[in-house]
Image (tube, grey):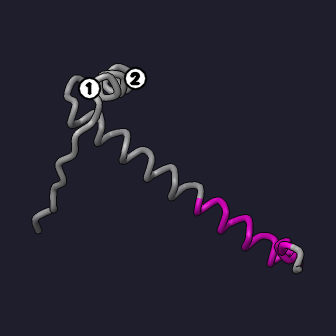
Amino acid sequence: MAVAKVSISLDAELVVEVMVLAGIGSPQDAVEAVVRDYIARGHRTEARAEHRDGVRREDGIAPLEPPQG
């Protein structure tokens, strides 16, 4: 199965900073690592939020809803 690729242009200073912070020598690999980490963090946050909502429901505590009106 082939994976679609996207080419983008980024500011060189931004890419160099990502490379230094990630400790990765390839611009492509450094930016890809940051994007993958960002996505993984989002999934972990979603999982924690779902877990908390499930615990509240099991305890009989309904999640807070915003006031109406």
Tell which of 5 and 25 is nearer to you. 5
Residue 68 position in % (x across, y down)? 88, 80
- Tag 1 residue: 12
Question: Could you tell me which residue is drawn at 40 percent across and 23 percent down?
Answer: 21
Please report whichever mark, 1 or 2, sits nearer to the chain's N-terminal start: 1
Residue 67 position in % (x across, y down)? 89, 75
**Residue 39 in magenta stretch:** no
What separation in Å lies between label 1 and label 2 (alpha carbons)? 14 Å
The answer to whether 61 is drawn above or below residue 40 in the figure is below
Please give left or right for residue 50 compared with residue 1 in the image. Answer: right
**Residue 62 in magenta stretch:** yes
Report helix, strand or loop for mark 1.
helix
Magenta stretch, overall SS:
helix
Please give left or right for residue 58 compared with residue 54 in the image. Answer: right
Please give left or right for residue 42 compared with residue 64 in the image. Answer: left
Question: Could you tell me which residue is drawn at 77 percent across and 70 percent down?
Answer: 55
Residue type at mark 1?
Ala
Q: Quadrant of the N terminus?
A: bottom left
Q: Quadrant of the C terminus?
A: bottom right
The answer to whether 67 is drawn above or below residue 39 in the figure is below
Image quadrant in which you'd find residue 32 = top left
Which stretch appears magenta? 46-66
Within 10 Å of disc 1 (Cα), the crowding (few <14, some 14-19, many 20+) is few
Tell which of 25 and 11 is nearer to you. 11
